[in-house]
Image: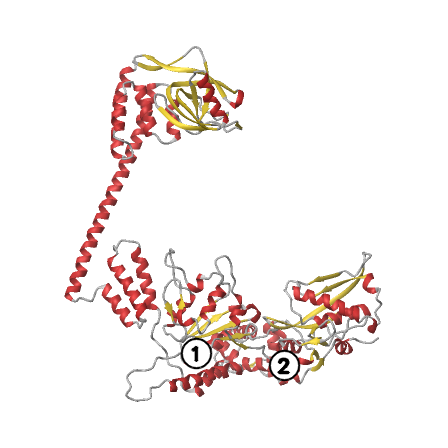
Amino acid sequence: MKTARNVTDAPKTYNCLYTGPKVFFPECTHSFEISGNAGFEAVRSAVQMDQSILIITDDVEGSKDKLQGSFITNNLCSIGTVCTIKSFMQAGEGIAKVTLVGIGRAKIVSHHVGPNGVLIATVNEIFYAEDKTAGQCGRLIGRTRELFRDIVKLDNKYPASAITQINLSAHPAVTCDMVANLLLEKLDDRLAIMKSLVLVERIELLNKLLERDFERASLQREINEKVRANFDKNQRDYYLREQVRVISEELGDDTNEIAELRAKIDSSGMPADIAEKAKKEVKRLEKTNPMAPEIAVIRTYLDNLLEVPWKNESIDEADLKRAREVLDADHYGMVEVKDRVIEHLAVAQLKARQEKPEKADDTKLPEKKSSDAGQILCFVGPPGVGKTSIAESVARALGRSFVRVSLGGVKDESEIRGHRRTYIGAMPGKIISGMKKAKTINPVFLLDEIDKMANDHKGDPASAMLEVLDPVQNKAFADHYLEVPYDLSRVLFICTANDEGGIPWALQDRLETINLSSYTLVEKMKIAKQFLLPRAERENGIGAGKIGFDDKVLSLVIEQYTREAGVRELSRIISSLCRKIALGIVNGEIDASKRLKLTVEDVVRLLGKEKYSKDDLDKKAAVGVVNGLSYTSAGGDILKLEVVLTPSANEKGGELKLTGNLGNVMKESAQLALSITKSLAKDYGIDAEAFKKNDIHIHVPSGAVPKDGPSAGVALVVALISAFSGKPVRGDFALTGEITLSGRVLEIGGVREKVLSAYRYGIQNVIMPIQNQKSLEKVPEEVKEKLNFVFANNINDVLGSMLVSH
């Protein structure tokens, strides 16, 4: 018997067919398609010369090298398979179908690239001679056949004829290669068998690999049988549960879960079509295998459907006087908001009277209509003026439940409408989730920060809010998770925003806007005495009425430790004072039995040096510097405008440079202001050549803050004319107004906020468009008494008041 390795003395040369990471064994037939010039030419020329061909493959243990033609020269296995070419059929340009029969291994001595990119290898062929290990090989190959039969029986992917084929192979080497070709799948395993040149060692290695695969296949079969057994048990359990359910129904036993769900649906008050859909889901739940994943999905859906209120409605407060007292007790001022809530209650009462049946004995009540239709309020104002808290007070005044949802940063439409049930972890959106918390169909629903919604590739949440806030559409709001229409028409929606311009115009059209303006000093003092100080005393354990402020001290705290439109910072300052006083009481430094009246010295000692001063704004007359008035989402503010002229290095000159994070509208206002300045140059003694000789730099300080809008147009003209004429601008004046190319001063918005900001900074004179004279009605009297207003119709009216004559 031929069992030992023997290498031929005379090396032979063969064309090589590179097959990449694939191993072809001797004694096996291989049919495949080849493509590429190198492989095609190698086989074609071998056929023409009636020669065999050498199949070579990658060696995973070899070192990587450059790609040479269509193969990697230094990454080749040192052992190849010599094959006779049984058939060669060209199927296209550089493509052929071949059938090769392996006849033996060959050790590669050297290789080089020949014509047409063909790899040519010089090899020593390996054959087997008789030796004394023949008996050992026979015993080992018998074990190989046993393992082969066991694996084929375990794994159904191998044909039964494979066992017969292996049994018919007489030679151990042939059997070994055939088994390896059929059963080994990993490249490392196939390479190891291919490179093993001692037959005894090769068969031993193959047996080890087969025993490993047999254990793996046995374990997999055992697992599959256990899974099948569990599945059969689940089927049996399901069948028994079905029997129990049927028996329970026959006996009238309603204590099971399915019966409870049906009872909840009947008592929930759902519309008939929605109740029918819910019962279909219950029927699905009843028929589904308890171990199926769908069970959890159906149960969660039914729970959400039942948790949403369908008929539970709170009754609005009938006593208008009590409702007014509730609002006054929680907030100072805000007359417009409070009047609007009282009007709402009055309208609701009138509608309720109209909806009563004409006859006392009528049992059929008319369908209830929503008294809230068309009443979607939006509170717009700077931070800290009480938009969110007044909404909660509205709910208390109406006697309704209150729900708040923050929309700041929401950019996914699904957060409003919910996710479809096909997604893992799907849940209802914020609207339906809020209704679940409210537990009534007519809560006060606060949509906070509606101006701060965003959008991205997941959708536009503002578009989803159109349906929520439209009184016509929200009677059948569609949540993607519930998949049934839900009536939101009885909900009183209240939105809050800092900037009305940040709300999409389509949403603005559906909202009734109520502006909450900045507080004056007098208003802040009353709020501090009535609300902030008593609350801070309670929260810090001091006790109500233990701390006293006179107006002078409180004015110091408001004006020199805060500078804001609302009272949020003021609340923090008062809380800080209370904490420091609490510390003094605990340390024994302050007598808790006596009422403590704070002085100016006490405030400075406890809070440190004041942060702000009315005199921190430079009010000296200066060339090219103007105090503009601006309105932002945080309230009104003073906007400094500065113009500097520099000699131009350009022959044309007149370059306009704008800095300070300005928006497009403000940049256009600067261009317009320069044109007006040129047109007025002669009237104000400006040399026309100055526009050519100088570059113009306009800067608005606080460069990190974006600024935009047309109301700085007048201020820009004044600053430019001052810079070119050399006449200083009065620093105790502040102005606002849009300018036209003809020099007219146009009406602007935000007058109340702008006037209050001038008052906070100690400005004494305010210039504004003559059309805004009517807007002063909303400015508190104590502010108007301390300011001098100049109303301008054109730019000359402004310049006459602002420029200081030499």
Q: Secondary structure at mark 1?
A: loop
Residue shown at the point (31%, 60%) measured from the top left: 298
Q: Give the image's coloring scheme.
A: secondary structure
Label 2 sits on residue:
775
Residue shown at the point (77%, 64%) measured from the top left: 644
Instruction: Between residue 374 and residue 784, name the one nearer to us.
Output: 374
**Is 632 left, or right, of 32 in this rendering?**
right
Q: Earlier in the sequence, mark 2 or mark 1?
A: 1
**Is 728 left, or right, of 285 in this rendering?**
right
**Residue 2 in view, yes or no:** yes
Q: Residues within 10 Å of mark 2 (few under 14, many from 20)?
A: some
Image location of residue 170, percent across then percent down: 27, 18
Residue type pointed to by label 1: Asp
Image location of residue 729, percent across then percent down: 77, 73
**Is 595 left, or right, of 282 in this rendering?**
right
Residue type pointed to by label 2: Ser
Label 1 sits on residue:
372
